[in-house]
Image: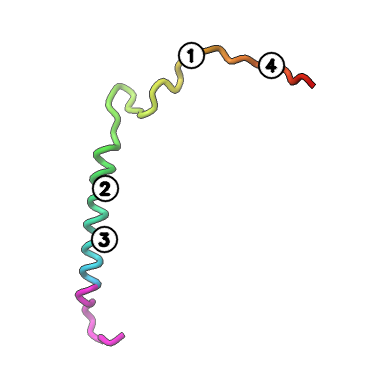
């Protein structure tokens, strides 16, 4: 704590600026990939459709 003035050091401003820029880039990338196109807007396709095959239930043999 060499500085006693009320203003933050230039290094702290630089770090805050870089974090802010990184957060803006992250938010921009997330916004670009967020929305799915289509009627329901879901990224999951065929979640409630019929399965390709009928499931078989078997008893344990023993």
Q: Quadrant of residue 41?
A: top left
Compute the Cα span from label 3 to label 4: 56 Å
The image shows residue 29 at horizontal and vertical percentages of: 25, 44
Secondary structure state at the residue bearing disc 1: loop
Q: For residue 58, which numbered disc appears in the image?
A: 4
First in sequence: mark 1 or mark 2? 2
The image shows residue 47 at horizontal and vertical percentages of: 44, 23
Q: Quadrant of the N terminus?
A: bottom left
First in sequence: mark 3 or mark 1? 3
The relative height of residue 32 versus residue 59 in the rendered view (above or below) is below
Kindly report which numbered mark, 3 or 1, lies closer to the viewer in this rendering: 1
Please report the residue visible at 77 percent of the width from the left and 19 percent of the height from the top: 61
Residue that sits furthest to the front in the current view: 62
Q: Would you name the residue on which mark 3 appears?
A: 19
The relative height of residue 33 versus residue 48 in the rendered view (above or below) is below
First in sequence: mark 4 or mark 2? 2
Secondary structure state at the residue bearing disc 4: loop
Q: Are marks 3 and 2 in contact (CB under 8 Å)?
A: no
First in sequence: mark 3 or mark 4? 3
Please report the residue visible at 73 percent of the width from the left and 18 percent of the height from the top: 59
Secondary structure state at the residue bearing disc 2: helix
First in sequence: mark 3 or mark 2? 3
Compute the Cα span from label 3 to label 1: 47 Å
Q: Would you name the residue on which mark 2 appears?
A: 27
Q: Which residues are magenta?
A: 1-11
Secondary structure state at the residue bearing disc 3: helix
Q: Would you name the residue on which mark 1 appears?
A: 52
How is the structure coloured here?
Answer: rainbow
The image shows residue 15 at horizontal and vertical percentages of: 25, 67
Please report the residue visible at 52 percent of the width from the left and 12 percent of the height from the top: 53
């Amino acid at each position: 704590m060499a500085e006693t003035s009320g203003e933050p050091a230039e290094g702290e401003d630089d770090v805050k600026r870089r974090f802010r820029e990184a957060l803006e880039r992250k938010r921009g990338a997330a916004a670009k990939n967020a929305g799915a196109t289509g009627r329901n807007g879901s990224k999951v396709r065929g979640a409630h459709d019929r399965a390709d095959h009928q499931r078989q239930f078997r008893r344990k043999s023993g």
